[in-house]
Image (cartoon, rainbow, N blue to C red):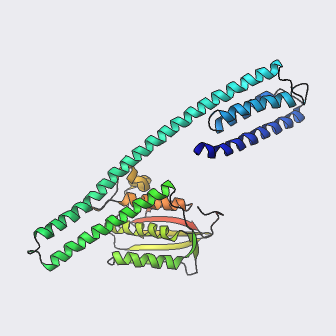
Amino acid sequence: MKHSKQLLPDGLFTLVTLLITFCVILFLQNLFDSRTLTPMIFVLGVYLVSWRTQGYFWGIAASLISVLAVNYAFTYPYWAFDLISPECIASAVVMLIVSTMTGALTTRLKQQEKVKAEAETERMRGNLLRAVSHDLRTPLTAIYGSCSAMMENYDTFSREKHLKMLSSVSADAQWLVRMVENLLSVTRIDSGEVALKKQDTVLEELVDSLLVKFRKHYHQQTVQVSLPEEFVLIPMDAILIEQVLMNLLENAVFHAKGMQNLWLRVVIDQNMAVFRVEDDGAGIPEEQLPRLFTSHLTGDTPSDSSRSSMGIGLSVCSTIIKAHGSQIHAQNRPEGGACFYFALELEDTCDVEQ
């Protein structure tokens, strides 16, 4: 199936390359009144076709077509075939050798790249499984311990103690649900199973919906919001962008050690809406900033909390923002704390939904 899909692009590339080669030769002959460059330019065209296309077929086909073109249009008698001439046979042999060697080389390189990519994928999958296993162990252990303690000491624990332990179990279970949602999102988007559904979204409605959900789970943390005064419409997949913002706010709650204030700011800069989530916590260690959005793939999960899914959550954010055609960044604030920010276009420049 993959080869059949590649057949048409390779054929078009071969045709266009040979047509351009033919036109360049005609132009050079009219300019310099010389035919010495003709074979070399066709050899270059054959090389490009062999290098760019899959397998050997199109390179060999380009070689044969080039030999016929040279024989017909650029070898005496002009505009007639003389296929038994020594020049024609020599050109055919040279071009076939060039196309075969180039095809073999590019095929080998592509196979090596494929093997390397597969090995890297397996390494990333292994690191992800190790990171996820580590991240799941802590809350699951806490849930198991709390449930066991309540069952073994049902009559001795007070009602307040039971409620406190149940609250802890509920928080850990909620965190596990969020983590599974993040993992499903990043794997589905990476595999292409989820297409973006961009729609014009009112900024205030997006933020209101986000804050309702955030306050439901983290009512003890206040989010200071700053939005543009004007009415703002942004083309986006609102569900996924809300997930990004929720992840960033949750990361601040879980990982911003010493945080007192949490801000969500949106500013309009030319044709972009810039989202910023800032805190006044301890900030991010400088050595972690370059790999912050891929830390779950390397097995390094920066965390100031027992719940160490920061890397996975940020990887989800990065994947979603990239799918929207942008980038997410992180930096430490000069006055202390961390800042995560990304920008979305106010007008969708894509004619076709991603």
Toward which corner of the image does residue 154 lie, by quadrant? bottom left
Percent across and percent down for residue 56 are 64, 32
> Observer-nearest residue: 175 or 81?
81
Instruction: Residue at the far left: name it.
Output: 156
Residue 119 located left or right of residue 219: right
Q: Quadrant of residue 6?
A: top right
Image quarter in which the C terminus is found: bottom right
* Residue under the point 53% across and 60% down: 323
Which residue is at 68% across, 45% downward? 8
Pick the residue in front: 156 or 305: 156
**Residue found 73% across the figure and 34% down from its top:** 45
Quadrant in the picture for residue 7: top right
- Residue 67 lies, in percent from the top left, at 78, 28
From the viewer's side, name the closer residue of 151 and 124: 151
Question: Which quadrant: the N terminus?
Answer: top right
Image vertical order of residue 209 relative to residue 330, above or below = below
Q: Position of residue 113 (x, y in %)?
A: 52, 38
Is residue 41 something one can see in this rendering?
Answer: no
Q: How many marks?
A: 0
Coordinates of residue 138 in the picture (x, y in percent)? 25, 59
- The residue nearer to you, when weighing 237 against 12, is 12
Q: Is residue 39 above or below residue 210?
A: above
Residue 239 as seen in the image, left or right of residue 38:
left
Let me know if residue 311 appears in the view.
yes
